[in-house]
Amino acid sequence: MQNLQIVDEANALFLGKFKKFSSLFLSLSCLLGFLLIFILTGCGGGNKDNNNLASVVYTINFYDDNLDLSQSIVVPSKEVNLAQLITDYGLPTPLYEGNSSVDISTYTNYSITGSTNLYATQGIQEIRTETELAAINTDFVTLSGKYVLLNDIVLDTTLDETKGWLPIGNETNEFTGIFNGNNHIISNLWIDAYSYIGYIGLFGHIRDAQIKNIGVEIDDLNGGVKGYGFVGGVAGAINNSSIISSYSIGKVGEEEDIYGSALVGGVAGYVSNGSSVINSYSIGDVRGDDQVGGVVGMAEYDSNIINSYSVGNVYGDNQFIGGVVGYTRYNTNITNSYSIGDVRGGGFSHFVGGVVGIAQHDSSVINSYSIGNINGYYFVGGIAGSGDHYERIQYNVAINPSVNGNYEYEVVNRVVGLNDVGTASDNFALEDMLVNGNTVSDDTDNGEGKSEAELKTKSTYQSLGWGFGDDNANPWKIDANKNNGFPYFYWQE
């Protein structure tokens, strides 16, 4: 099913919001004669398109059900012949009811709202301003809508000088629609809700929804994004939903950009029930107490983190702290992902890893890497702090300068701190990596140690069956001029 939208390119709004024409204001009689429905036709005689709209160019935009632009067609006026369009452009049939010449502005598949706004009945609406963005929160209907962002938005902190942005969707009233950011950026995001509320981010809580192609820039000057729990740069929590090709950006090495007590991630705080975070990333520092990750705080119940990464430091004061995800369990997978930055646990912190703090109950970490120093108290590893209950940790490389804990060696290792009833195989590690200040021997939890030169050689990895290619099944690449010579992923090119 395709959605038909009209664009007036003479400074009108995309997707059918038409600007008032100056001719509308020439006379009071014109206003009264063509109130609301006919504002686009102007006043005057029969050849209205030629007389009043000669300078206007109309474009018909076709969007698929996921709100991706599939085709744009320029037409000379708002009156078009659908049958001719189908013939000329090979459009699917039936495009809409009937194939005769129709006036788009009064066509039955459209409705005119107010005095200037033309929307498709399918519910697709464009977002241009902060006010329109915030209005998604209005009620159940708007929270379930389909939205396309048409430009960058700089959030105005004066809307709430004490608390900042009000997240879209909350614990009980989730966002359940589709939001396509069209590769635009929403900047100046800050939220100060640490002392009283959870579900914090640009979106607070989403269910059965999709967010894609959106960039979020964190406002560090106003303290970044802070919430009690379920805190993320893009979304606080996602349930049976997906975040695709999206990111949050702050500043590395300064005040934490994203901060919470539990379930805290650079992109999303909590991911559950078949949800996915795909082709997404976070740049900036993340801090919390429990379930803290550079991309996702916690992911569980058949969820997936794919082709995603974090650049920045991750700090956790208690447990489940990871460079990509803090905690995964119940058949949840991290694939083709990486972290660059230190992962630091404070006090008696445990389950601290360069990619994941703990992978548990049939979860996996496959084809991933970590570059940064890893520090915790116990259950500390360059890839995973712990693998527990039939997890799979395979085809990973730990390029960490050091892994440190304050406990005996058997729970602080180059690759997996503690591997309990699981599988860790075909993993590599920098042989000069210091584990509690010393180099260590190869074993299942420490991986196969190689020199820096060997870790920059393709044949090293091929010896254990690593896949080099251009797809998710064979994701690895190696080039002396990229990633400092260490392996990287095809999607990083």
Image (spheres, rainbow, N blue to C red):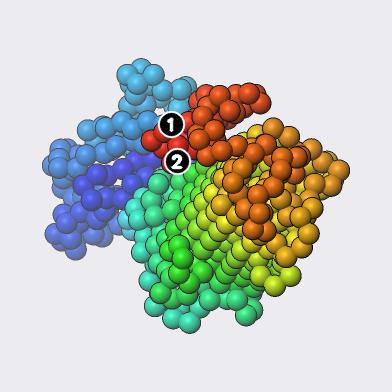
Mark 1 = which residue? Answer: 479
Label pair 2/1, CB-CB below 8 angstroms: yes
Label 2 sits on a secondary structure element that is helix
Label 1 sits on a secondary structure element that is loop
Residue 133 or residue 400, whichever sits in front: 400
Mark 2 = which residue? Answer: 483
| Residue under the point 75% across and 40% down | 443
| Residue under the point 78% across and 42% down | 391
Amino acid type, residue under disc 1 in the picture: Asp
Image coords of residue 308 (percent x, y) = 55, 44
- With respect to residue 234, does 406 lie above or below? below
- With respect to residue 190, does 454 lie above or below? above
Amino acid type, residue under disc 2 in the picture: Asn
Residue 54 or residue 481, whichever sits in front: 481
Is any part of residue 98 visible from this angle? yes
Residue 366 or residue 461, whichever sits in front: 461
| Residue under the point 60% across and 76% down | 194
- With respect to residue 433, does 405 lie above or below? below
Image coords of residue 435 (percent x, y) = 66, 54
